[in-house]
Image: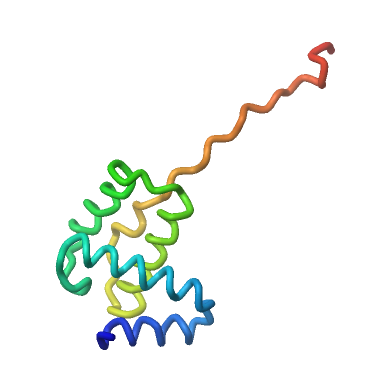
Amino acid sequence: MTEMRKRMIESLQLAGFSERTQEAYVRAVRQLAEHYHKSPDLITEEELRQYFLYIKNVKKYARPTTTIALCGIKFFFEKTLGTRWTIFDLIRPAQPEEAPTSTTPSGGYG
């Protein structure tokens, strides 16, 4: 286990995250690093931007999966590395579409 991964896990434990959340967040950072074939601390803000476009438009991750990736990667950069990037303010997983609601009483007659 790398020192960075160990530090991230310790930070997650101190923050009170469950073991499953810790695993999901570490997995999100690992997948990011594997995508670029380099250590996650060397990834640039522009590469992060491109990665989130990739998982949205190519991989077509579901909203919950995108949210986990965003939260895990954001935790790594902000809490483990102490990096604050504006890209994290821009990324918002898509909201699920809601069925239209009717304003007329049931039956359709006033």
* Residue positioned 40% across, 70% down in the render: 25
> Is 102 displayed left or right of 5 in the figure?
right
Quadrant (top left, top right, bottom left, bottom right) of the N terminus: bottom left
Q: Image height check: is 7 above or below 63?
A: below
- Left or right of residue 76, residue 102 in this image: right
- The quarter of the picture where residue 88 lies is bottom left
State the colouring used for the structure image: rainbow
- Drawn side of residue 22 relative to residue 28, left or right: right
Residue at image location 24% in from the left, 58% down from the top: 48
Residue 66, quarter of picture: bottom left
**Residue at 44% in and 80% down:** 12
Q: Nearer the viewer, residue 15 or 61?
A: 61
Q: Position of residue 7 (x, y in %)?
A: 33, 86
How many labels were placed on the picture? 0
Q: Is residue 58 above or below residue 15?
A: above
- Whether residue 109 is situated above or below residue 93 in the rendered picture: above
Coordinates of residue 92 in the picture (x, y in percent): 41, 50
Residue 83 position within the rendered picture, expressed as x and y whole percent measured from the top left: 27, 73
Residue at horizontal 39 percent and vertical 83 percent from the top = 9
- In the image as oriented, which residue stretches furthest toward the top? 109
75 or 34: nearer the viewer: 34
Q: Quadrant of the C terminus?
A: top right
